[in-house]
Amino acid sequence: MFNKVDFKEDILKILKIHFGKSLDNSLSNEKYYAVSKAIMNLITDNWIKTDIKYKEGKEAYYFSAEYLMGRALGNNLINLGLYEDVKEVLNELEIDINNIENLEEDAGLGNGGLGRLAACFMDSSATLSLPVTGYGLRYNYGIFKQEFKNGFQVEKADNWLKHGDPWSVKREEDTVIVDFSDSKVKAVPYDTPIIGYGTNNVNTLRLWQAEPIMEFDFTLFNEQEYDKSVKEKNRAEDITRVLYPNDSKEEGKILRLKQQYLLASASLQDLIREFKLRNIDFSEFPKYHAIQLNDTHPVVAIPELMRLLIDGEGLDWSKAWEITQKTFAYTNHTILSEALEKWYVPLFKKVLPRIYEIITLIDERFVEELKSKNIKEDKIEEMRIISNELIHMAWLAIHGTYTTNGVAQLHTDILKNQELNDWYKLYPNRFQNKTNGITPRRWIALANKELTDFIAELLGQEDWLTDLSMLKELEKYSDDEEILNKFLGIKREKKEQLARYIKEEEGIDINIDSIFDIQIKRLHEYKRQLLNAFHILDLYYRIKENPNMDFVPKTFIFGAKAAPGYFRAKGIIKYINEIAKLINNDPKVNEKIKVVFVHNYRVSYAEKLFPAADVSEQISTAGKEASGTGNMKFMLNGTPTLGTYDGANVEIVEEAGEDNNFIFGARVEEIEEMKKNNSYDPEKYYENIKGLKRVVDTLIDGTFDDEGTGMFEELYDALLKGASWHEPDHYFIFRDFDDYRKSHEEVSNAYKDKLVWAKKCWINMANAGKFNSDRTIRQYAEEIWSINSKRI
Ligand SMILES: *Cc1c(COP(=O)(O)O)cnc(C)c1O
């Protein structure tokens, strides 16, 4: 039980022990640290108990190179059910809880959706009291901090550990050694508790940090060769120094391979060490372990387990292979071909010679298997793991695991029927769908306390945060004016809060009465921020032509980081910032539309944006977005989707109805048809769709200045001439432009009648139950991992 007096004393004691200070002279970040450590103190006994309990039987392990956790303090308090209590204690100490919450650095150990999914899965696993442990890497620098200079993205190092990390505990005693051809390093685990909601269970996220075996060379140091004496230390630490800031693009670097191998090898050594304490035969290994590979980044774990079993434990090949295949499961996250990870053989062989050798043996046996099934030669060449001097990690993943899953129904269907059709025909029973989800604890209970309280009041209890399907009961209020008006009041409050924050952070005033139209996600061509930009500019020109046109004011909000090496994505950021400058400085127009590109979009910013949105922009080219999870966060906060039939948008509309969302554009079938017949002619649209040429030409006619970088012309060429390996307008922006514009008109019309609009928002929220990540995790637990809840 929580005791306020004890808790208060704990905080004061920690300030004394850790900083040698009293409350009065402590800095804010020291107070944050002490409060966090006092919470660690509260949960430690349960954490130990949970660990012991889980060891009794089968556990699942989530291997992921990314965990986009965001902040821990507020979320942990919500999950413990102590937010209000702790707020009161802090008040008595004259500490403002919001103040110290906002001091916490985001743990940004991921790029975007894939890393955030891993974080939501951790929350759901703990909440369901499921024996699931996360394994990952403790990057000293997370995803870069983004600033804008003259509208250009500038990246800054994210030193998230500068004030220490109160939420992790170093477990020196569990250190393992990881071997590369040119060096050996220590992998040291740091454990972070994952506190469930409505349970006493506390799960574990274990992140490895690379350290040198020898801190420095004493002899060299004495010889005053200082740089040389710490060379090995730096080289080792380099491995987990920084997260690769790439999303959906292959990044073939030696350091990245070392990161992947460190994660795989250290985690498996950890599991094998524990398993051997059981003193049972290795054939029982899969009865105790299910390992989920989050995309291909940790797939090198497949040959690594083979190595550990054969070289380390003396098993023969066929027994080791059987164990391996029964242990691993693989999640595919993308259909973009450029994102399917491949390693160049000479590079791979140089860093991991023994692992390479094992992959060649897997490949040879696989070829035999295909031959025995009478698969044709050329098919075999396409499917084998090593071909054209490349190791295909996705093929290794499908072959070396017992299930492959997609992350939304449409995505899984495309995998089965198109991208991975050969594989589906080979292993039809291995393919599954697991539609993604989001944790309602962070994405509504923490981010939108006002709406959370209102829902609790209407439902008369609080269990709905674990059983989101209960939201369906709220549908009966969808014509209740009083309820809808209260709901609109909450939305307005969230919009005011966001407007204040945007004023502080970006220095821009926005109009609360305007439609907040929001697109927040990584910057990528397939996500089509450029389509959004073209539409805004078209709107601008139409308002200029016809200043008296009937118009509902709109504020267009963007948030997105571009991978530092992704030139075209950076060009799109600059272009949108140029459009923003033009529009926001035009006094005749800026009453009607405004454009804000918020800087450094991240989890903590996201928590302020989702609840304040009126429109959710989900406008990827159909077939390209595997699922999306941002779309679900909007829906849960009562925001209709303006989007294409893609990823989980399809299921969102299935749940909440087409009438309550705004679906536009080419569907997967149409796009496939155009590709097959080579019949897409962007030029035709460019010439004929009213207004399109006018906006596209601003890329080259001097309307905007890219300061001689050539960025804008390059974008223009990509659309009209084709660039690198792509056809012109590879993402069908011109095809969808007019449909998109019409959908915006529909949004404006619907918004004019407050209650008509509120009803759409309300029905979306009431039907968001499916997208709880608890549902997703239950399906993984039952249909892939075969594990059960184990409450302490
Ligand atoms: C949810 C989330 C994402 C994923 O957004 P999508 O729209 O699904 O691509 C990316 N970044 C952050 C910070 C998020 O919270």
Image: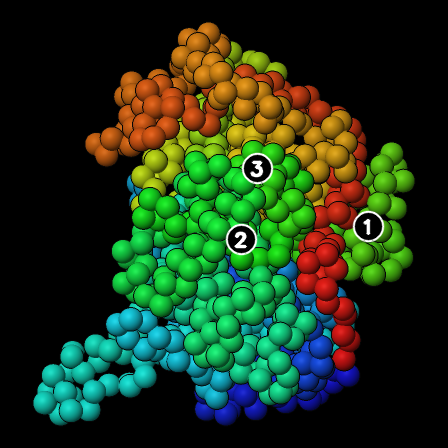
Horizontal placement of 560 versus 258: left or right?
A: right
For residue 785, which numbered disc appears in the image? Answer: none
The residue pinned by badge 3 equals 421
Amino acid type, residue under disc 2 in the picture = His
Looking at the rendering, which quadrant does residue 722 occupy? top left
Looking at the rendering, which quadrant does residue 773 occupy? bottom right
Q: Relative to residue 403, is residue 220 depicted above or below?
A: below
The residue pinned by badge 2 equals 399
Q: Relative to residue 87, is residue 520 depicted above or below?
A: above
Q: Do residues under tags 3 and 1 come within 8 Å of each other at their CB atoms?
A: no
Q: Which of marks 1 and 2 is nearer the N terminus?
A: 2
Q: Earlier in the sequence, mark 3 or mark 1?
A: 3
Residues packed near mark 1 inside 10 Å, few (<14), some (14 to 19) or many (20 plus): some
Q: Which of marks 2 and 3 is nearer the N terminus?
A: 2
Secondary-structure class at tag 1: helix
**Residue beneath the point at 56% across and 70% down:** 319
Secondary-structure class at tag 2: helix
Q: Distance between the residues labelled 1 and 2?
A: 36 Å
Residue 661, image x and y in percent? 70, 30
Name the mark nearer the viewer: 1 or 2. 2
Secondary-structure class at tag 3: helix
The residue pinned by badge 1 equals 469
